[in-house]
Amino acid sequence: MNRFFGKSQSKGMGKVVILCLLCLCLFPIGVWGEELYGYTYDPYYENPDTGYTATVFDYEDLLTDEEEEKLAEDMEGITAYGNAAFVSAYPEGYSSREFAENNYSQYFKESGTLFLIDMYNRKIWLYNGGEIEKTITPSYSDSITDNVYSYASDGDYYTCASEAFRQETILLEGGKIAQPMKWISAGLLALILAFLINYLIVRGTSKNKKSKEDVLINAIAVAAAITAGGAIVTSRRRKTRSSSSSSSRGGGGGGGGFSGGGHSF
Amino acid sequence: MYRCVNCGAGMRFDIASQQLHCDYCDASMAVADHPDERVASEEDMFDVTVFCCPQCGGELMSTENAATDFCSYCGASVILEGRIGKEKSPDLVIPFLKTKEECQEIYKKKIHSAIFLPKEFKDPDHIDKIRGIYLPYWVYDVKQQGDVSLTGTRETSKYTEYLKMDCHIDNDYDGVTRDASSAFDDRISDFIAPFNTKSMRPFTPAYLAGFFADISDVSGDVYNESVKNETNKRTEKQIDSQYPGASINYPPDESAAFGTEITSMKSAMFPVWFLSWRRDDRVAYAVINGETGKICTDLPVDKKKYYLGSVLLAIPIFLLLSFLPTIRATTLVTVSSILSVGTMLIYAVNSRTVYRREEHLDDLGYQAKLAEEREGEAGSAPVPVEHAEAKKKVKSDAVKEIVPSVIVTIIALLVRFLIKPVSDIPYYACAIAVLLCSCYVFTVLIKKYNVFATRPLPEFHNRKGGENYE
């Protein structure tokens, strides 16, 4: 769901989970959106039929007032399906994902979509929940951010966000969005995989097999008489304990607690 | 030719009844009962018609003198030139046990699953050209006798034990076989093995009636070491079974340690059904053991079928990929690079296999004949000669065929992991370039596979033929 448009930071899943746990601990201190910037929750638009809202939290002042209003209008279509929010922020020390997730949970309790422009991590992030998530799957979120990231790279943040919400609306209304590179990549990958699979089929079906040893030996007349004397042990050397065998014994004695210690490395 | 005692027509050896049979008057008689048989079995030489292919120089002999219109070696549809001659009788023979129809069924079953095979392979007219040929073999009796002292080790839970073992060996291996025709690839004889040498019987030309035979042109001594090594390996296994759990160190010269000696070497004729297919300057063989039905086939690929099949298979894979989460540009570069490295590895392995096959480096019989022509010496196991030119060609082919792909893959990986551009375009460009290169490598791989799955037209030694024939 994220789209890099600057220096990227890659993080492992484990790290993300640990950070999420840390964030949960820090949450009461109040570092997200509203508390961070001191703004209040004031929606631009509330859908009279559904009660869902469209809100713009431009903490980094990336949009002009006019653009904010236009963007809120662009988001109106989404309010038929859930809440919509645009957030621009500089969440120093936090990932875009954490920031988007926590803002989402702070503002929306139900179906919704949040488009974040993260100026600290230089990322755009689309976060969806509830009913909207059923249509805007992570795969579609990827496609949308793929389609709009270049506007953010050029500094055209309004078009970036507006285009993202427009594509979301199209999808929510049952339409299709362009994913040209997805199809080109999938097409070429499919072709290569087909080449590979067919090649393996060719090699597999054309293989000639030699007869097994017992079949070969049965075909000749063998009169084997081996008189084997006993094996005399001339010397013997005690095996040295390897470090792996020691730790394996230690592990057996210590049970589950030991294995936990092992994972800390 | 064995004439029918009733009507005088030519008789043939009937596989089903294992008797001589006259197709004209339907008379049958046991091989031993034919009047000509008593004379033939007492002679060292027997009358044959030697058919020579004007294109490849390959020779087949037969007791029949009827004209034959295709060459089994090079697949050419030509009238083979026949001449009357005498050939030395081999000592032993295994008669055909599998009929032509049975072998045709075995062949059809084998090619059934080869979906990209050229259509001619399944053509009934082509399959009907399967021909019964007796191939010359050498049959060795090997004796091993002596006391052998061995050392080894055995692992227990606490100790490594060093062992000394004395045993007495008194082994006889009768009927170890090697093919005696330089035209017949040793690998094929390995694949169609074994022939049950316990069912061999004394040779008589009557078994050849209705069939062809290849001519023996490899000295039996060529295989002496190979035969000794084979029996030594079998003895090793027997000794191993006597000392369970022990890891035995066998001496480098096992033949001396085991007292391995070849006590007799006899010539024999073994039955195979042979089918050849030719396209341009390549030929593919299907060879079926005429006694057991074991088959070895060259199965080339029809490139058009392969490409069409790949495009068709790509459709469901494409649909499947469409249901999966979007493959990001960076992931695509990584995946395409992995696939590219995979195809390059396959290429490297194949190139080596094709090179060895084309140069006959694993064909002892062919190498022996080559050494004989080169040095004028026959009868010793040759050292395979690798031609510098052929090696150079493999390298230059690799430069042309795979180096662009290597360079593009390296660039793609540098872009992905070092340069890390913001825009997706460089990633997609790299991935598409890598994937296109992989497509190209696959086309080369299929070309190479077809070289592997076929053979160059035979050029029989000391005869004009093959591509040089004018």
Image (cartoon, rainbow, N blue to C red):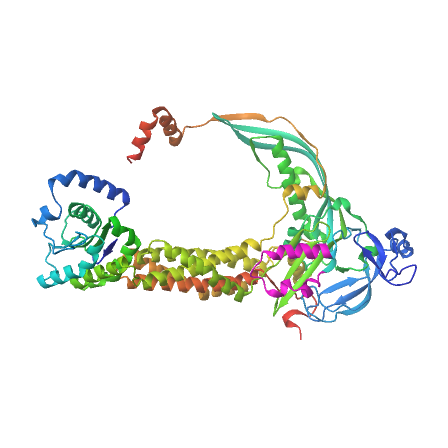
Q: Could you say where residue A114 lies in the image, as x and y percent from the top left?
A: 19, 53
Q: Residue B56 is drawn in which quadrant?
A: bottom right
Residue B126 position, x and y percent, is 67, 65
**Quadrant the C terminus of chain A occupies:** top left
Residue B399 horizontal side relative to residue B256, left or right: left
Q: Nearer the viewer, residue A36 or A138?
A: A138
Asked if one can make out residue A194 in the rendered structure from this viewpoint, the answer is yes
In this view, the residue in front, A147 or B457, is A147
Q: Main secondary structure of the magenta part?
A: helix
Can residue B394 be seen at all in this image of the molecule? no
- The single residue placed furthest to the bottom in the displayed view is B470
Res B371 → quadrant: bottom right
**Which segment is the magenta one?**
B101-130
Is B110 within the magenta?
A: yes
Was residue A18 drawn as part of the magenta stretch in this picture?
Answer: no
Residue farthest to the left? A38
The residue located at (91%, 62%) in the rendering is B7
